[in-house]
Each structure stands twice: as C-alpha cells, then as structure tokens.
Image: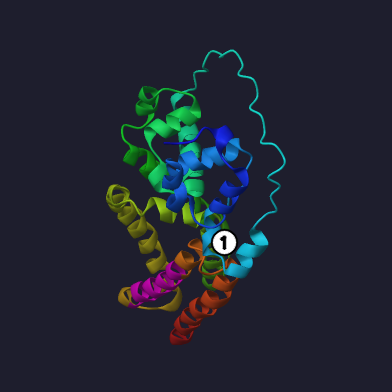
Amino acid sequence: MRKPDSEIDRNELFEAVWSAPLSEIASTYHLSPGGLAKLCDRLGIPRPKRNYWRMTPGERLEARPEFDAITPAPQAAPRKKSARRSRLPLPDRRAQLLDIAAQIVAEEGVDEVSLNRVAREAGISEAQAHNCFARRIDLLAELARREVDEFERSRKGIVLRGRDRLAQVVLSTVNYLDEAGRRGALLQAILLETEVREVLRSERDATRALVSDAIVEATSNTYRMSKEEAFASNWLITAIALRAGRLVSNGSLSTAAGVRLCLPMVMGCMRSNAQAAD
C-alpha cells in the first residue's frame, strides 16, 4: 500500500532515484515510473534525465546535484476555480498532444505514453484525445513522422549551401549527426515499437527511394559512373552515416566524435569516386 506523500522520507527517495532508473524502483513505492516521477516533482526532489544512466560513474558523480532534505517540499498552489476549457482547432490540439507525448518519451520512456495520459496532461478527456488520434500507435506514428520531417527539412536546408557534390555530402553528413544528437534519441525510442515501424515502413521506403534515386542520378552524372556503381556508393555512404547517427542518438558517441570518425570515411568514398572519374 502506498504511503501518503507526507510520510515519505525525502532524503531516502532522493537516494533511491539517483541510484537506479525509475523503472526499476517504482514498484517499491507502488507506483508506475511516471507516477514516481510526479511524486518527485511534488516533493521537490530532483531526478536524473534518461541519459544519466548511460554516463560513466565519474560523470554521474559530477551530474548528481546536492540535495537538502531539510528544506521543506514546495507547497502546492491553491486550486483555482476551474476555468472553462479552451477549445483548440484540431491541428493545434494534435500538435499539443504530440508535444506532450514527446516530453513523456524523453523523460520516462515510450511505454509511459497512452492517450489517457496525454489527455490528462493536456487537461482534456480521453474521448477528446481519441478525436485527434484513434489509437496510441497512431499518436506515436505521427510523432515519428514529425521527427523524420524535421530531419528532412534540416537536410534540405543545409544541402542547398553546398557548391559541389562533395560539399553537399559533407554538409549533409555533419548536419545529420548534429540532428541525431539533438533529436535522434526520441525517434529511436519511438521506433522501438514494432507497430510504429510497420505503420511507417511503406512510407519511409517510398521517401527513401525518391531521395535515393535523385542522389544516384546526380552521382552517376557527376562521376561518370554506372547506375549500379552510383547506387552502391550511395548505399555505403548512407550506411556509414546511419550507423554513426545511431551511436550518437543512443549516447554511445558524442556528436563531435561521430563527425570526427565518420567524415573521413565518407570523404574517402567521395574522393575515390572522383579519382575513378579522372
């Protein structure tokens, strides 16, 4: 049986949440990980971000804050008379729910996302949330689409700055790794859901083919290569960048290290193409 908030030892809870992930200790408090996170917030107890558990012991020691258990927990503000719920246009409401879902994924993990939860956070009923997204999977799939669109928008913007094919590939690779560091963890977490991957697979394949065909055509014309060679060259460069991006996204590699290791291999492929064309 869960204790009332007033009976929980704040210092003990602080030590617990900084010693193991919320998902591992939540059951001790008869709560879900999300419920434990809310309890910490109510009691004014700082909690680690998800990437904290990927740090080395030394890095964790530096990241762990000081905690004064003597300082009283913040008092909840008096509840105001409930205001009339504002009606948002459907596109705005969908965007709001996507933002809430993204925050939950980043802080607590994709398993904590549900239409009931995002509706509660938005201050609307679950039925209203279902008017925006029929199923939880539809919500997560749309969130993944939004992240992919941001990646692609960023890529297109940076590629236009390149004056030649080599410059475009270099700029695109650096930009991709930078985006992977900033938003890749969210997309990776969502794509762990099998149903989301299935929903997006056909869409991603079509988009990938459209982008790849244009790149293969440009590579073939620039370096006087056959379409087969151009396709293989593009596949190798893409595979290198994607693998580095995954390592950056999951915190195994810093963005700077990813660029330092990945870029020479990508440029080597491009220079090899140029030499073959001479």
Q: Is residue 193 above or below residue 72?
A: below
**Where residue 248 sits in the image (x, y, percent)?**
51, 65
Q: Is residue 123 magenta?
A: no
Q: Which residue type carries mark 1?
A: Asp
Q: Quadrant of residue 167?
A: bottom right
**Where residue 10 sits in the image (x, y, percent)?**
61, 43
**Where residue 128 sits in the image (x, y, percent)?**
39, 23
Out of 8 and 31, give the one closest to the viewer: 8
Q: Main secondary structure of the magenta part?
A: helix
Q: Which residues are magenta?
A: 229-243
Residue drawn at point x = 48 percent, y = 86 percent: 275
Q: Is residue 54 above or below residue 15?
A: below
Q: Badge 1, how many Cα within 10 Å: few under 14, some, many 20+? A: many
Out of 126 and 208, give the one closest to the viewer: 126
Q: Is residue 118 visible?
A: yes
Residue drawn at point x = 58 percent, y = 76 percent: 260
Q: Secondary structure at mark 1?
A: helix
Q: Is residue 145 visible?
A: no
Q: Quadrant of residue 235?
A: bottom left
In the picture, which quadrant includes the N terminus? top left
189 sits to left or right of 176 = left
Residue drawn at point x = 47 percent, y = 68 percent: 247
**Where residue 60 sits in the image (x, y, percent)?**
61, 63
Q: Quadrant of residue 55?
A: bottom right
